[in-house]
Amino acid sequence: MLKVMFQRLGSKKWMTLCLVAGIILFVATAVSFPLYKDAALNRMLRDEFSNTISKTGKWPAYTKFNVVIPQKGDPQEIFNAERAAEELYSQMGVTKKETVGFFTLGPSSVSSTMNRDDVTDVSVRIGSYSNLGEHVKILSGKLFSDEGMNEQGEVEVVISSDAMVRLKLLVGETLNTRLKDADGNKIVLKVVGVFAASSSNDFYWQMVSKSANQQIFMGEECFKKLFLSGETASYSCTAIFSDMFDHTALSSDNVQQLYEYTTYMMNEGDYSKSFAKPPYLAILDSFLAKKDRTEATLFMLMIPVLFLVGAFIFMVSGQLYETEGNAISVMKSRGSSTWQILRMFLYQNVFLMIVGCLCGVPLGIFFAKVLGATKSFMEFSASRSLSVRFTKETAIFAAAACLICIIVMTVPAVSYSRVSIVGLKQKKALKKHAFWEKIGLDFICLAIAAYGYYTATRSSEKMAEDVMKGNPMDPVIYISSSMMLVGLGLLLIRLQPLIIRLIYTIGKNLWRPAGYISFTENMKRGVKQQFIMLFMILSVSLGMFHASMARTLLQNAENDADYLSGADIIMKEVWHDNSYLVEEEGQEFTYYEPDYERFGDVEGVCAYTKVLYDNATANIGSKNVQTLLLGVHTREFGLVTSLPAGLNEKPYREYLNELAVSERGCIVSSSFRDEKGFSIGDNINFTSSDGKKLYCTIVDFVDYWPGFTPSASRTDADGNLYFEPAYLIVTHYGLLYEKWGLQPYEVWMKLEKPRNTDGFYDWVNSQNVELSKFGIRQENLEAVVTDPLLQGTNGILTMGFLVTMLLCSVGYLIFWIMSIRSREMTFGILRAEGMHRSEIFQILINEQIFAGGFSVLCGIGAGLAASKLFVPILQTAYSASGQVLPMQLVTDSGDFLRLYAVIVLALLVCLLVLFGTIRKLDVAKALKMGEE
Amino acid sequence: MENIKDKNTPAPVMEIEGVTRVFHTPGGDFTALNDITFSVPEGVLAILKGHSGSGKTTLLNIIGALDTPTSGNVRIKGRSLRDMSEKEKDNIRRKRLGFVFQSVSLIPHLTAFQNVEFSLRLAGVKAGDRRARVEECLKMVGLFNRRDHMPAEMSGGEQQRVAIARAMAHRPEIILADEPTAELDSQMAAEVTRILKELTEKEGVTVIMTTHDVGLMEAGDIVVEMESGTLLRVTDNR
């Protein structure tokens, strides 16, 4: 049985190879989806966490229990919370980084036993931090001992260097308190050491409360023994347990568990009252919304690709059965049952599937990596590789792909296994209209597409709303564009014979013999050729459509990121102030300005300027609106920033010039005019975030300004989406400085080469610059490229195009080789009648033009038409409210050139192979004129 | 060419001079034709007779410039095939030769009319002159009323008659017919042979056909008998 199977497959090795290639590509494509999705989402998750860390300087992955027990309260409550905190890691499915436990009593007064003149009683908080020793360096003295008490029964404590200055305490000092331990003994403290944080980048200190410079720390065990060991607490006590976990160990599959358990803890758990809303919840929220949308969208993009590959497998296996048609008929006439024949093919298909699966899965892993390196359509960069891992989901996808393959391969066998010799001959004589032509499938598809287009353009707001809420794009819209392509493809195929006939009739008497044969042949060919032509039209038109879609999505997202970045680099240093002196010595509050001249030294920066950036309030009558306030130096700001032409009425620099000549002028967003009725020359009052007031005179209105988002989407109480206009006031930095004094400002910089940020990083590192905010345009642009939704879209579109193009070429070749084989005798007759070899080639070239060339041209036309109609809709669906700048349909001639290059290459290869086949054609043999 | 030649003073339209054809096969060299020499005068029906494997088809292929002899030469109207390029041979076939093959020799996607017309197109006959000639030829083979039928819609005998019409349409000097009656019943075979015979008389064309059907022998003006690649005898029945 097996031997027979191998012999049979071996005799048709090229067809079999094509079929296996189809299966491999099917499995690889199917498997690459979960692989890529998982890896890209994990990368996105890690990116969201690390972006938060770099923006806020804080570790967001922690939870916080806050337990307060009053005097006479039950200390067990604290221990229960501590246990709950410890158990939380496993319940949330996260990897523990560190639990920081903090215990403190209320403020209490202590007096030094040294009786120094300058020291009176001081108010302190007595507390303890877990693992304090690991996070501090001792500046003088030592850390408290493990027991926490010395031989005299004095409790050993340490204080921070800040607290030392503030409380004026010394190392070695003994402090009397009014506190008593559980046994009623008076507690005496001894300061044994002064510490400072061992590193300013240690996230441990983020968990330490601001009042640490009022605190005196003792060992944790000692604290528990002294204050929490009794039946009831002798003093009111606060305990905070922070579970810090490792966000890099999170993956997209345990996010759901983490999210659900966290919300459970907040709302329903035993500790819901003491469990604070953790900062990572917002990250997870946005991640989960993006995840669902990304998964659904990528899956929908994958479907047409899988469909085309499936169609290929169907076609090739059909061809394979057809070549076996005679063998099947003979088996039938010898008494084999349909089921026996079917079983034979089933075994064969299972074998082919196993081979395909074994090669397909590794190829899928490769595909997933290629997807992860996609930059735009048909463009790759290896800047950030993906770590791909094999998940359960991948196995499910692989199994499903195999099953579908088997079904697709075996279904055509059913009809062939029923055919007897008589049936086969009858079937060959039949040459009628295809089923789809009779039912008008092309018109049905076009009608669905038209309906989809109509609803999408009518309800674009609702669509945007859905996307905003994280719902996946309405499938109808995606289907509509595919429907339009299929419909157009079928319609063109229906028209093709008519067009050919028209051309033939026009030049009826002009055609040379080769042309005559080609025309008459093509007009008679019918159904068989339609499949390959449709395949070709769909591959090319999908390629065109996807190219413009991918380019539009990417370009718009990049333009947005470019615009929103404001400048190449925006940074704000940590500003120190004299606030602690204001309280104590009545000094006037002032900021210490970092040395501004240093920015001249940053390598690669060609211009920089101070920008005061404040979330201010505009006072309009009795009402206030939130507004962004920018204080700029007009000339420098113009050098550092730029704005694409056409966004505002006038060129960008003109607005800066208008502002420059008006000493107390300001440029405001057009929302002030449209929503609040302001006009040029009006005065506008505003208040800074720290309460300072000023008014300016409006010199002009703008719609867009570097770094300004004109409107923000919000959801109201009923969950409906609405757009809220945003407000902007731009005025002189000098004016704000003069009226409000020195304020922490941002520095906006322009780089000589926008891509080269090395100089800036070197400078930050070598100068130990402390940043409180910074943004780099280049990194924002890179984030756009690696956004899983965009990159996945681009990747799947590219991969889909390459895969379908490859299959299309192979399918095209198979079709033509088969077609030539079946016509070898005709070619023999033509040669015998005296046709030159070159004329035979001419016939082949004509046929390629009629079928292949026609399909490619139709594909390009259909692709462009579908792009014009549907890409803007899909673009809205992708970016929705996220889009800030007006959307543009972008096409890149480079994309199309790459696409055409692939098509031309495929056609050339086909022609070469066909020429080779014809060259080998032996006329005498073809005519069976040789020795019989 | 139009007028009927005097049969008594025939000039050879085709001369075969010492043609030998050796096929190189994995099992060793095989001599299909061994030093064949004879000539055929213009306007006769010549029959190549012999069993399977006697080499008659190989000889016909060589005469039709579809195959090249290992040694020896073929002259058509005095022109040596040996000295011709492939393109010149194509042109000889196109204008001076007509073929009828054993089974199917029609182009499947063309109607009877188009099949016949196509050989005129190949021969470079102007569009205006084609229709009348095609109709004339189809009438001669008795299939004028089936001119718009496809080959698949006709019987084997009908197809062969269309093939004959096609072979003669462009007024070739020689028509080569390889076992044109092999797949036909005896009545139809006689009919096809009669048409070929009639052609030599009406159009003055020379017909060389192979057959193993003894019953058809007497129709031939010249009968060339072959056996195992060698020429047995040439009989002139005129």
Image: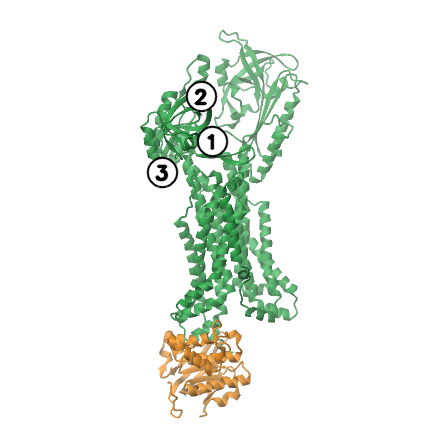
Chain colours: A green, B orange
Rounded to the nearest whole Å, what is the CA distance between mark 2 and mark 1?
Answer: 25 Å
Q: Amino acid at mark 1?
A: Lys
Question: What residue lies at 50% left-to-right and 41% top-to-bottom?
Answer: A461
Q: Nearer the viewer, mark 3 or mark 2?
A: 2
Q: Position of residue B162 (x, y in %)?
A: 48, 79
Up the image or down, A806 lies above or below A158; here it is below
User: To which chain does the residue with label 3 belong?
Assistant: A
Residue A912, picture quadrant? bottom left
Q: Helix, strand or loop at disc 2?
A: loop
**On the image, numbered disc 1 is attached to which residue?**
A55
User: To which chain does the residue with label 1 belong?
Assistant: A
Say which label, 1 or 3, has the lower sequence index: 1
Foreground residue, B227 or A273?
Answer: A273
Can residue A40 be seen from the camera position used here?
yes
Say which label, 2 or 1, has the lower sequence index: 1
Give residue A753's mark.
3
The C terminus of chain B appears in which quarter of the rendering? bottom left
**Mark 1 surroundings: few (<14), some (14-19) or many (≥20) residues within 10 A:** some
Q: Position of residue A32 (x, y in %)?
A: 53, 48
Q: Helix, strand or loop at disc 3?
A: loop
Q: How many marks?
A: 3
Q: Helix, strand or loop at disc 1?
A: helix
Q: Amino acid at mark 3?
A: Lys
Foreground residue, A416 or B40?
Answer: A416
Asked if the residue under mark 1 is in contact with the one under mark 2, i.e. CB atoms within 8 Å, the reply is: no
Say which label, 3 or 2, has the lower sequence index: 2
Q: Nearer the viewer, mark 2 or mark 1?
A: 2
Asked if the residue under mark 2 is in contact with the one under mark 3, i.e. CB atoms within 8 Å, the reply is: no
Q: Position of residue A271 (x, y in %)?
A: 63, 27
**On the image, numbered disc 2 is attached to which residue?**
A691
Rounded to the nearest whole Å, what is the CA distance between mark 3 and mark 2?
Answer: 40 Å
**Mark 3 surroundings: few (<14), some (14-19) or many (≥20) residues within 10 A:** few
